[in-house]
Amino acid sequence: MSFEKLAELIFPDVSKTPEYYMEKYPKRNLKEGAKVVRYAPSPTGFQHIGGVFAALINERLANQSDGIFYLRIEDTDQKREVEGAIEDTIKTMHNFGMDFSEGMTGEDSEKGEYGPYRQSQRGEIYNTFAKDLIKKGLAYPCFCTPEELNELREKQIAEKITPGYYGKYAKYRNLTPEEAIEKINNGENYIIRMKSPGNPEKRVEFHDLIKGDVSFPENNQDIVIIKGDGLPTYHFAHAIDDSLMGTTDVIRGEEWLSSLPIHIQLFEVLGLKVPNYAHIPTIMKQDGGSKRKLSKRKDAESAVSYYREEGYPTVSVIEYLLNIINSSFEEWRAENPNVDYHEFKVSLDKMSKSGALFDIIKLNDVSKDVICKIKAEDVYNYYVDWAKEFDKEMYDLVTNNEAMAKQIFNIDKEGPKPRKDFAKWSDVKEKIFYFFDELFDKETKENVELPKNLDLEEAKRVIEAYAKAYNFNTDKDTWFEDLKKVAIDLGYATDRKAFKKNPEQFKGMVSDVAGSVRSALAHRNNTPDLYTIMQIMGEDKVRNRFKKFIEL
Ligand code: GLU
């Protein structure tokens, strides 16, 4: 009876019961096997690639099972909150092809029948459950000051015993309700703790959908469920929210794995059904000889904004993350080069149990594969969108020369083995700058790459001769025949075997002649097909480049 009085004193305004809420949020009417999963960030404003990774796994599993993927905002740590973070989260996920079927839709709006989806608006719900636990003697107010807790901790560490607030060290655990009531009436500050029924000599066994079978000592810490500011801890809110919102599978970062014994116990104490769990490996990075967590401070690629600024298509990032989620994705992609990634079936049991290694070089390879399959017209549009924000000079050049830009993006695209020049839009400029006089004319002599066997003076001689023979209006074969004639006239070999046999009889190979033309037009050794470049540039520009080269 007096527990009841204590509960009434602490929560005088709470009139509902846990049963009320359990009825209010009935089981969803979904097909067998449908997963209800969530993305549950704290609105700190920083979008970490690990967040996209976690969201992607949840979103894929929901969609694959015709389930629900909802957004819950975990804002119980209000010091860390950043304005606009909810909208930013929704926008980021949308850009990565993920939309929520339920939950927050903006700073002050939401959709779905299981809300509020923002923890700071669920105070009454948490209080209802906390009140009920107090009534049942399963939770209690704790009056320890931070200093007292520190002192306890230091003493425990000095005595080499497990630190924390538990068992006989839990000073207020066994206070009678009357004693607690008196303290509250005296105005003493308190928080609410769960009275843990656990015994660390016993173990809890659990099957994690990624980690497999795991086993831990039972929790015996009287963990805090309601903090001094009246808001719940992550643990308490997690158990209540995921129950009432009908989450079937809690798929979250592995940093929460060690809290699993607490969570399982909380569900039991609350009389709620334990969901399935899957703990996602942390994204790691190779740093010299060792692996470490991708760091917000040290690694630019930890921020989602990095991928936008560098100009990675979001599909590239998604496909790369799918590679990390299931290594079988790569094989699937090779067998199904043109199928949408949504058709790939993500499975948790095929996921690596240990760290997920993040590798930018691999991302670049994946992204080149993605971009090379995008039609030139679309490449143009993506590039213009990116450049508009991140490279105004290129934006102006490309949009003022739209037809040429589309031809450039179409070079070697339509054959069976399309070119893989770009991993990201910020790669484009260096690969195509020479088409634009405005950029080409900024080059200095030092930038000019020459064919391996030739110096600048010899390359100029080649260009002088070639300029006379050059005919714009020919097909590729004739064009090459003309080039060969120039080569022979200048003493270059057109036959590799002849050259290999008597190299001293030649100045070089016909490829050096072509290489000189390439140097004159692009200042680079590595370009797409020369004939195509010349066709795109047009006769005037080509002749003009020859002239500039000779004058270098
Ligand atoms: N708000 C928690 C976090 O950001 C969510 C963990 C979870 O998904 O349960 O780490």
Image: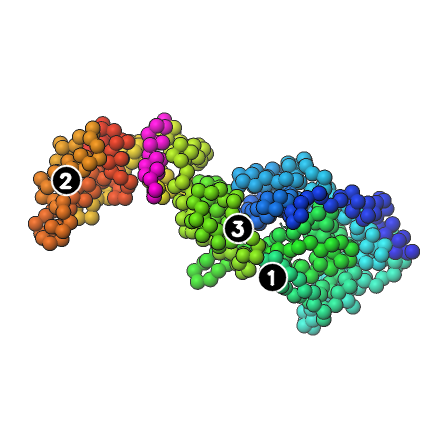
* 514 inside magenta stretch: no
Q: Residue extending furthest right?
A: 1
Checking the image for residue 405, the label placed there is none
Q: CA distance from mark 2 to mark 1?
A: 66 Å
Q: Which of the marked residues, 1 or 3, is nearer the chain's N terminus? A: 1
Contact check, label 3 and label 2, Cβ < 8 Å: no
Q: CA distance from mark 3 to mark 2?
A: 56 Å
Callout 2: SS = helix
Which residue is rendered at x = 45% and y = 33% of the image? Answer: 385
Q: Is residue 215 above or below residue 305?
A: below
- What residue sits right under mark 3 in the picture? 296
User: Residue 75 falls in which quadrant of the image?
Assistant: top right
Residue of label 1: 212
Which mark, residue 484? 2
Of 285 and 471, nearer the camera is 471
Q: Where does the image place residue 381, in percent across and percent down from the top left?
A: 43, 32
For label 2, being within 8 Å of ligand 1 is answered no
Task: Give the residue type at disc 3.
Answer: Lys
Dot 1: few (<14), some (14–19), or many (≥20) neighbours within 10 Å? few
Q: Is residue 523 left or right of residue 69?
A: left
